[in-house]
Structure formats: C-alpha cells, structure tokens
Image (spheres, rainbow, N blue to C red):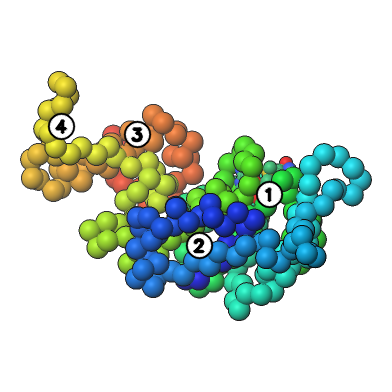
Amino acid sequence: MRINLISLFPGMFRCVFEESIIHRASCKGIIEIRLIDLREFGLGTHRVVDDAPYGGGGGMILRPEPIARALESLPERGHTILTTPRGGLFQQEDALRLSLETDLTIICGHYEGIDERVNALFVDEELSIGDYVLTGGEIPAMVIVDAVVRLIPSVLGKDTTATGDSHYAGLLEHPHYTRPRSFRGLAVPEVLLSGNHQRIRQWRDAQSLEKTRQMRPELLERSLPETRPHDPGKKKP
Ligand SMILES: C[S@@+](CC[C@H](N)C(=O)[O-])C[C@H]1O[C@@H](n2cnc3c(N)ncnc32)[C@H](O)[C@@H]1O
C-alpha cells in the first residue's frame, strides 16, 4: 500500500513511522509512506499556504492552491481522506475497509482548517478521530495509518493476529497475564496455567463479554451475534 501524507509539518511523522511495526512494514516493502511537505507547494517566494477567512473571524485558513498542487503532484492519489473534527468517527471497521486500498492519501489540516473547495474537488471521505479539536491533522493521520497498516496481512508477525483484538469483532479483548505467577498478592487465574486449550478459550470468551459489559455496554448492542464468542452465561436455544 502506498500512503501519501500531505502536511505542513512532515517532520512530526518521522519519529512515529521510523519505529516499531510501521517501520518494519516499510522496510519489508509492504507499505510505502510518502511525506509531502505542503510548504513546497506554497505561493510565491515566501511559499504562502494560508490566508485570512472571507467574511472575517479569527485564525487562518489553508488556501486551496497549494493543496491542489500537492495532490496533483502525486503519481497515484487513490482514496483521499481529509482529517477534520466534523468527519465521520474513525472506527475499527473503517481501518479494515481502508486496509484493502492500494493507494491512500491523507490531507492534514492546520490552523482553522482548509478552504472548503478542496473538499468538493478532491476529498473522498472526511474522518475524525474523536469529538475534540486538535491543533492539526498530523496526529489523526498517524492514528489512521497505524490502525490501518497493522491490519494489512503479513504486517503483524505470524504469531500475532489482529482478529482477537478489541473492536475487531465488536467486543473488547479478554485480560492478559504473563510472568510472574503471583505479583504483590495477585495470582494469575488458574485456568491459564491448566494447559487445557478449550477451557482457556472459554474463559477468554467469557472475560471478553464481561469486560465489554462492564466497560462499554453499548458495544454489545452493536456487535453481531454471529461474530461474538459464545456467551457461557446464556443458554443456547
Ligand atoms: C484546530 S483544527 C480546526 C478545527 C476547525 N476550526 C473546526 O472547528 O472544526 C486544525 C486541523 O486539525 C485537524 N483536526 C483537529 N481535530 C481533529 C479531530 N478530532 N479529528 C481529525 N482531525 C482533526 C483537522 O485537520 C483540522 O483542519
């Protein structure tokens, strides 16, 4: 997958994408991330990218021409996303859908946002990462890229799968334990030491349901019964 990130602050991405799983996926050639510096497409000798809003009001707006030029400089744009607090809420199902794209372009807004005409001309989808306002679209773009890339087959190691993670099938994941067996008076649940894989699976399924019930009960309404693990608390018909 090729991912184009259009930003006034491309340096913000480097430390995040040059570590861990995203970095490994780049090294293996599974993804190619291109950082496009919006400033290079700015107007005039001062490379201007923003201006005051028509109609007055505070703040600056990103002008359409530099963004259009940056987008038109790309050999392939693919699905084009604008990060914005007014967008649809980015969810795991969006990450899964976007992980099937071959080319993805994400525009990072800044200041008061971008000229609306960019939307009309170039944007396929507006995405928000939550109901709060950040300074710029760089962190939302990092969140989207991270969630999408780990769902591309072969990005996670062969011993790790995303299908058991929280939100993949609509529920939260079961709790995890590792060594030591006892820590400050708290023991690892006996079933996890039993070596009985069926009992362990049943315990994890039950814990997954219980955690969801406790922490995010509204997810139970949304999750499809056929994707849910068997609820041992309920009798089968
Ligand atoms: C300060 S915000 C602009 C907020 C805009 N004036 C508004 O009220 O919707 C600057 C940029 O940060 C990004 N941004 C801020 N919060 C975001 C969020 N929750 N999700 C996605 N992008 C966000 C967008 O790219 C936005 O253009």
Q: CA distance from mark 1 to mark 2?
A: 26 Å
Which amino acid does the dot numbered 4 rest on?
Answer: Val
- 184 over 206 or under it: above or below: above
Residue 236 visible somewhere in the drawing = no
Mark 1 is surrounded, within 10 Å at the Cα level, by few (under 14), some (14 to 19) or many (20 or more) other residues, namely many
Q: Which mark is residue 110?
A: 1
Left or right: residue 230 versus residue 30 is left
**Image quadrant of ligand 1?**
top right
Of marks 1 and 3, which one's residue comes earlier in the chain?
1
The mark found on residue 188 in the picture is 4
Which residue sits furthest right?
Answer: 55
Left or right side of 190 for 221: right
| Distance from the alpha carbon under mark 2 to that under mark 4 | 37 Å
Q: Which residue is mark 3?
A: 211
Circle 2: residue type: Arg
Residue type (three-letter) at the residue carrying disc 3: Lys
Viewer-side label of 1, 4: 1
> Which SS class for mark 2?
helix
Reply above or below: 29 against 56. below
Mark 2 to mark 3 CA distance (whole Å): 26 Å
Q: Residue furthest front?
A: 45
Query: Which residue bears the numbered disc 2?
Result: 97
Is disc 1 in contact with disc 2, using a CB cutoff of under 8 Å?
no
Secondary element at image label 3: helix
Total labels: the figure holds 4
Residue 38 appears anywhere in the view? yes
The x, y position of residue 62, in whole percent, is 75, 54
- Which part of the image, by quadrant, shows the C terminus? top left
Mark 2 residue crowding within 10 angstroms, few (<14) / some (14–19) / many (20+): few
Q: What crowding class fits label 4: few (fewer than 14 Cα within 10 Å), some (14-19), or many (20 or more)?
A: some
